[in-house]
Amino acid sequence: MSSSTSLIHHPYRPPEGFDAPQPGVFKASTVIFHSAAAMRERNWKSKSGYTYGLHGTPTTFTLEERLCELDGGSHCVLAPSGLAAIALVNMACLRPGDEILLPDNVYGPNLNFARHELANWGIAHQLYTPSATDDLSGRITEKTRLVWIEAAGSITLEFPDLIGITRLCRTKGILTALDHTWGAGVAYTPLRFDQGQGADISVQALTKYPSGGGDVLMGSVVTSDDGLHHRIKTTHMRLGLGIGANDAEAVLRGLPSLHLRYRQQDATARELAYWCLHSGAFSAVLHPAFNDASGRAHWHQACPSRLAAGLLSLALPARFDQSLTDRLCDSLKLFKLGYSWAGPTSLAVPYAVSELASGRNVPLGTQFLLRLSAGLEDAADLIADLSQALAACSRD
Ligand SMILES: *Cc1c(COP(=O)(O)O)cnc(C)c1O
């Protein structure tokens, strides 16, 4: 046997019984079958066997099962990014002629997918006010197939009437898909926040809190309903969506510290929010614990834990035009300028109010919001950084 063959067909097998706290990384495009009959009969859908790399490995099955636990569901599929998970849900659930509803503070790329891809396929969308179930109710037609929910909403961070929206959709037989990247399965359980019930589909950017390292892109779709899962899983398979085993392992490594990191980033964000509020330097501080009473009530109702993500948005006073906002951003030293939050590094992103679909909680005259996301640095150091950047923007 030549070396090139014996390197591949080497007889050594490691002994059984190696056990370690973290699961191993199994990488495979192909899976070896021990007989033609096994090849014919193996079923990957029940996770009782392996057939092909794209259909799952011990590493991805393990991650899927842990995410089911996190989201309160029974089935999970993994997508190469949070946005791919959103697109997958749309493709699996919608047909030409259907309509969907999106909250007006929805994650921007979700709206872009509706505006462009869904519109091309003859699927219409409307925006609804997430704090008002009667607004949503008035927009539902016989063509409405899916309602997207985000809790809290992107950038402006209003907490919607999660329980009201999902109850309304359940009575009307309309599917709900909840993007709970903000909650991460920690602040509330997306499929069970209402006395054991919740959204039909939960989507999360694992990119953010579950990975926690700022170095992975991945998304999950979790459901409890077998039929719904089957639809999503077959679309996922036909599209050939897969994720790398090293990335799956990175998320598995992040999960044990998820709750700890989430609580710490929440606490740091609130310290920042209190300081910002008392500094008098901002027109408003947007955060579910500081928002108007109705948003706070919805947050309390769905999150008895009263936990919140490490995000806050600051409404800059009217004198902050483009150049002064740039100066504020460029003066920050510990806060880095970047979008994908929940890693160890605190981040800042300026948003022009004129480009937001929803300015409900933004005071009149505000031209820019500064969204901050708390990393794992010491809160006092972050406050000092913000304070020196504000000083660099003072009038004199
Ligand atoms: C970041 C984010 C996503 C998308 O995640 P990616 O993995 O970056 O595609 C989706 N929804 C929300 C609310 C997000 O914050």
Image: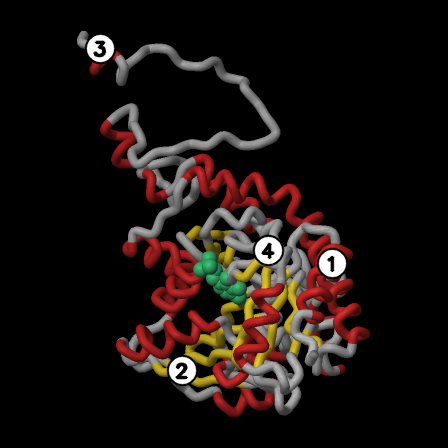
- Within-10-Å neighbours for mark 4: few <14, some 14–19, many 20+: many
Mark 1 residue element:
helix
Q: Amino acid at mark 4?
A: Ala
Q: Which residue is mark 3?
A: 3
Amino acid type for the residue under numbered disc 3: Ser
- Residue that extends furthest to the top in the rendered view of this protein: 1
Q: CA distance from mark 2 to mark 4?
A: 30 Å
Return the disc, 3 or 2, that comes first in the chain's sequence: 3
Choose top left, top right, bottom left or bottom right for residue 308: bottom right
Name the residue: 50% across, 85% down.
Answer: 354
Task: Give the residue displayed 74% in from the left and 69% down from the top.
Answer: 273
Q: CA distance from mark 3 to mark 4?
A: 48 Å
Q: Considering the numbered disc 4 on the image, is that residue within a helix, a strand or a loop?
A: loop
Q: Nearer the viewer, residue 227 or 136?
A: 136
Q: Earlier in the sequence, mark 1 or mark 2?
A: 2
Of tags 2 and 4, the one toward the viewer is 4
Which numbered disc, 2 or 4, marks the residue that appears first in the sequence?
2
Q: What label does residue 342 carry, if any?
A: 4
Callout 3 secondary element: helix
Q: Which residue lies under the disc numbered 1?
A: 268
| Disc 1 from disc 2: Cα separation | 37 Å
Residue labelled 3 has its Cβ within 8 Å of some atom of ligand 1 = no
Q: Residues within 10 Å of mark 3 (few under 14, many from 20)?
A: few
Task: Tell me if residue 56 comes above or below residue 272 in the rendering.
Answer: above
Q: Earlier in the sequence, mark 4 or mark 1?
A: 1
> In which quadrant of the rendered view does residue 366 lie?
bottom right
Would you name the residue on which mark 2 appears? 125
